[in-house]
Image (spheres, grey):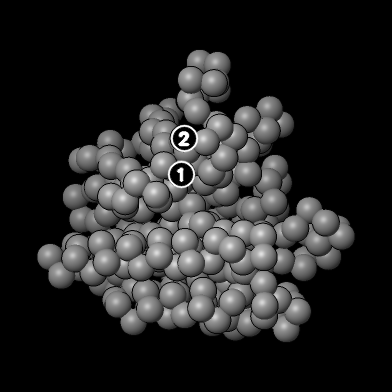
Amino acid sequence: MKITTWNVNGYRAVFGKQGFAWVEEYQPDALCLQEIKVRPDQLKEDQRQLPEYQAYWNPADRPGYSGTAVFYKNEPIEISTGLGIEIFDTEGRVIRLKYPDFYLYNIYFPNGGEENLRVPFKLDFYARLLEICDALHESGENIIITGDFNTAHKEIDLARPKENEKNTGFLPEERVWIDKFLEHGFIDVYRQLYPSRQAYTWWTYRMNARAKNIGWRLDYYLISESLMSRVRDVQIHDDIMGSDHCPVTLEIH
C-alpha cells in the first residue's frame, strides 16, 4: 500500500497548474492533502475528484485557510474528523480513516504563527492528539500519523538549525513533542530507515531556497512500533513541484 502526504498550500492553485498529473502515473492508494484552503462547494465538479479516487474533505470554517482532504482507492471502514475539541476542529486539521488493521491520520498541525503567538495552541493540539493515540494503543490498535507536522525534530532536519533556534518550527518546546510521540510507541519511519540522510520537504519561497536546497523536513510518518516490520520504504518526492512542500510516500505491506 502506498500512502502519500502533501501540503499543497492551496488546492485550487495546484489543480490549476495541473499539479496532480503525477498522481495518475504514481497511483498512491491514499493521497493525504493538507492546507487545501478551499471548500468542495467552491470547486467545479471535475475539480472535486481525481480519476479512480473517492474524496473526503474537511475544510476550515474560515474561508481560504487550513483544511485537509483525502483521496483514496480502498474504502475505509469509517471516516471521522477532528480531535473532539471545537477550537481545533473548526480549522479542519484532522481526517481519520479506519482500515481493518490500522487507523490513518491525515493532519495539518498548527503553525506557531507570527512572534510565536500560536505556539501554546500548537502544543495543546499535540497533547490532545497524543491523548487519543495513547487510548488507541492501549486498546491494541495500530496507528499511522502523516501530514505537515510544522516542526523539524532534530538539527539534521533543517538546513540552518542555529539560525532558527528561536523560530517556530524548531523551538525546544515544539521539538520535545516529537520526542513524546516516540516515547509513546511511535517510530519516525524516515529517520529510522535513513538515520544520517539530510532531506527536506519544505522550502520557503524566498531567496531561491528550493534551488539551493535550504529546507526543512516537516512532513512525517509516525507509525506504531508494531507496524515497522511491514514498512518497505519512505520516499521524499522533491522533484514534484506545485507547492512549497513536496509529497512524501510511505510504502507498507
Percent of width and height locating residue 62: 52, 36
Q: Residues within 10 Å of mark 2 (few under 14, many from 20)?
A: some
Please indicate, yes or no, whether residue 18 appears anywhere in the rendered image. no
**Residue in the foreground of this view, choosing between 16 and 25:** 16
Q: Residues within 10 Å of mark 1 (few under 14, many from 20)?
A: many
Q: Is residue 194 above or below residue 5?
A: below
Q: Secondary structure at mark 1?
A: loop
Horizontal arrangement in the rendering, residue 144 relative to residue 140 (left or right): right
For image coordinates 67% across by 72% down, the residue present is 167
Q: Quadrant of residue 181?
A: bottom left
For image coordinates 32% across by 63% down, the residue present is 128
Q: Quadrant of residue 74?
A: top left
Q: Real-space Cα distance between discs 2 and 1?
A: 6 Å
Q: From the image, tell me which residue sits under label 2.
A: 61
Percent of width and height locating residue 201: 63, 61
**Residue in the foreground of this view, choosing between 232 and 242:** 242
Closer to the chain start, of discs 2 and 1, is: 2
Q: Quadrant of residue 196?
A: bottom right
Horizontal arrangement in the rendering, residue 42 relative to residue 59 (left or right): right
Q: Are marks 2 and 1 in contact (CB under 8 Å)?
A: yes
Percent of width and height locating residue 171: 59, 77
Q: Is residue 25 above or below residue 39?
A: below
Q: Which mark is residue 68?
A: none
Percent of width and height locating residue 107: 43, 53
Where is the C terminus found, in terms of image quarters? bottom left
Q: Is residue 74 above or below residue 229?
A: above
Count the numbered circles shown: 2
Give, as a three-letter code, the residue at label 1. Glu
**Residue in the foreground of this view, choosing between 251 and 97:** 97
Give, as a three-letter code, the residue at label 2. Asp
Q: From the image, tell me which residue sits under label 1.
A: 91
Q: Is residue 171 above or below residue 63?
A: below
